[in-house]
Image (spheres, rainbow, N blue to C red):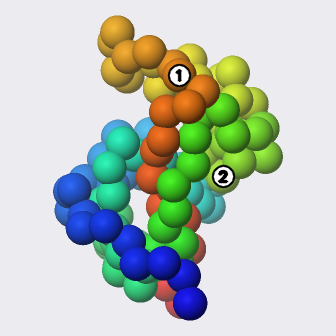
Amino acid sequence: MSEALPPKTCTIERLVTVAADVEKVIKGEKTATRRNGRYADPGEIMELNGHKFEVHKVYQQSLGELTDEAVQMEGYSSVEEYKNYILSMHAGMPWLPHMKVWVHEFRPVQ
């Protein structure tokens, strides 16, 4: 049994909100998203433009643990490309290898 997760800090409706990211999810190019807080519980359903996705994994990871393979689930080809995107969205945010983020992995509901 996995350890209990802390309370959510936001709602699943806020998990994927950028139009380009919504399109990536619908096309199957994005199967995970990282957030500063916890936005969903495993088993929760996210609906994007009439498409449903189930969150099946939620866990913490540090930015220093990111690999090119991990960010491909986010729809980016490399950690550097992902980092540039995140820093462009959050002006002034430091990129600290020890900083922890919440990973939410999801898949289409069949």
Task: Name the residue: 46% across, 44% down.
Answer: 101
Task: Name the residue: 40% across, 46% down.
Answer: 35
Label 1, label 2: how many angstroms apart (C-alpha)?
Answer: 21 Å
Picture quadrant of residue 12? bottom left
Amino acid type of the residue tagged 2 in the rendering: Met
The crowd level at tag 1 (other Cα within 10 Å; few <14, some 14-19, many 20+) is few
| x then y, percent, for residue 82 | 60, 29
Question: Which SS class for mark 1?
Answer: loop
| x then y, percent, for residue 99 | 49, 33
Picture quadrant of residue 65? top right
Q: Which mark is residue 62?
A: none
Q: Earlier in the sequence, mark 1 or mark 2?
A: 2
Name above or below for residue 26 compared with residue 1. above
26 or 87: nearer the viewer:
87
Task: Name the residue: 48% across, 41% down.
Answer: 100
Name above or below for residue 50 compared with residue 62. below
| x then y, percent, for residue 29 | 64, 53
Q: In the picture, which quadrant includes the N terminus?
A: bottom right
| x then y, percent, for residue 87 | 46, 18
Amino acid type of the residue tagged 1 in the rendering: Leu
24 or 88: nearer the viewer:
88
Judged left or right of residue 46, residue 31 is right
1 or 85: nearer the viewer:
1
The residue positioned farthest toward the top in the image shown: 92
Task: Name the residue: 76% across, 39% down.
Answer: 67
- Label 1: which residue? 96
Q: Of the residues tagged 1 and 2, which is closer to the observer? A: 1
Question: How many numbered circles does the render carry?
Answer: 2
Picture quadrant of residue 32? bottom right
Q: In the picture, which quadrant includes the C terminus?
A: bottom right
Name above or below for residue 54 compared with residue 64. below
- Label 2: which residue? 73
